Image: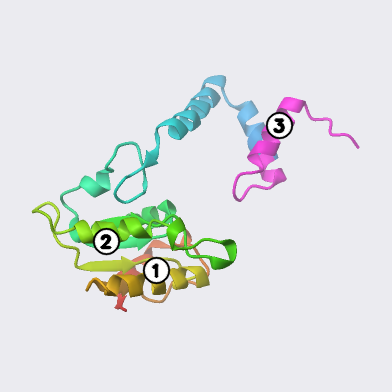
Amino acid sequence: MKNANPPLLENLIERLARLPGLGRKSATRLALHFLRQPEDDVRELAGALTEVKEKIKFCSLCHNFTDEDPCPRCTDTRRDRSIICVVETPGDLMALDASGIFNGLYHVLGGALTPLSGIGPDDLKIAELLNRIDQSGTGEDNPPCREILLATGSSPEGETTATYLAERLKERGIIVTRLARGIPIGVDLEYVDGATLRQSLEFRREL
């Protein structure tokens, strides 16, 4: 039977259904919700989506999303600038930072090593990480990097990435640590509860 929904509504449903975690039923409920909302609210949402796409970029230092470069985390003088926590995605960074226990700097790789999908070291921000370490220690506001905390995921790809980075980092005489066990295998850090993240950070181990 031919779909009787208005084409404009159907187009919205189809686009919403492409979002992560949304199937057609959820997308339909969301589309109908928008139709019931005041026009100004919907316009503000549309404007926010457009603005974030236009103005959000990557920090040239940590490669996290930001609207100013360098980002506020990288320029925060209250942070311990001698330790860098390496994560796969901006979502992982946000989850760790929200735990409130880590007060160092961050570095977002932009993914994990996945040879079967053709993602190798050159496809991630690994060279940029090594360059940050090599450039550290040039002044009072840029002390030598003494520790790299590898907070890549517990998936096989995350473990492979951590092993590769540990080998590259030890060549530079850097202390390399890894989040302690407790994070479920295969779960992205951004979905791990705060208590588990805090424990993993507190009991991180040296590689």
Q: Earlier in the sequence, mark 1 or mark 2?
A: 2
- The image quadrant that residue 7 belongs to is top right
- Mark identifier at residue 196: 1
Neighbourhood count class around disc 3 (C-alpha, 10 Å): few under 14, some 14–19, many 20 upward = few
Neighbourhood count class around disc 1 (C-alpha, 10 Å): few under 14, some 14–19, many 20 upward = some
Residue 199 in sight: no
Q: Secondary structure at mark 2?
A: strand
Residue 188: horizontal and vertical position, in percent?
Answer: 48, 62
What residue sits right under mark 2 in the picture? Answer: 84
Locate the C terminus by quadrant.
Answer: bottom left
Observer-nearest of 15 and 135: 135
Which residue appears farthest toward the right when viewing the image? Answer: 1
Q: Secondary structure at mark 1?
A: helix
Tell me if 185 is positioned left or right of 83 in this view: right
Discs 3/2, front? 2
The magenta region covers: 1-27
Residue at the location (45% across, 66% down)? Answer: 153
What residue sits right under mark 3 in the picture? Answer: 11
- The image quadrant that residue 183 belongs to is bottom left
Residue at the location (29% across, 49% down)? Answer: 61
Residue 174: horizontal and vertical position, in percent?
Answer: 23, 71
Q: Taking 203 as reference, is 104 above or below it?
A: above
Labelled pair 3, 2 in contact (Cβ < 8 Å): no
Residue 10: horizontal and vertical position, in percent?
Answer: 74, 32
Distance Cα–Cα, label 1 vs label 3: 41 Å
In the rendered structure, which amino acid carries the disc numbered 1? Thr
Distance Cα–Cα, label 3 vs label 2: 44 Å
Observer-nearest of 29 and 109: 109
Which residue appears farthest toward the left when viewing the image? Answer: 140
In the rendered structure, which amino acid carries the disc numbered 3? Asn
Discs 1/3, front? 3
Q: Secondary structure at mark 3?
A: helix
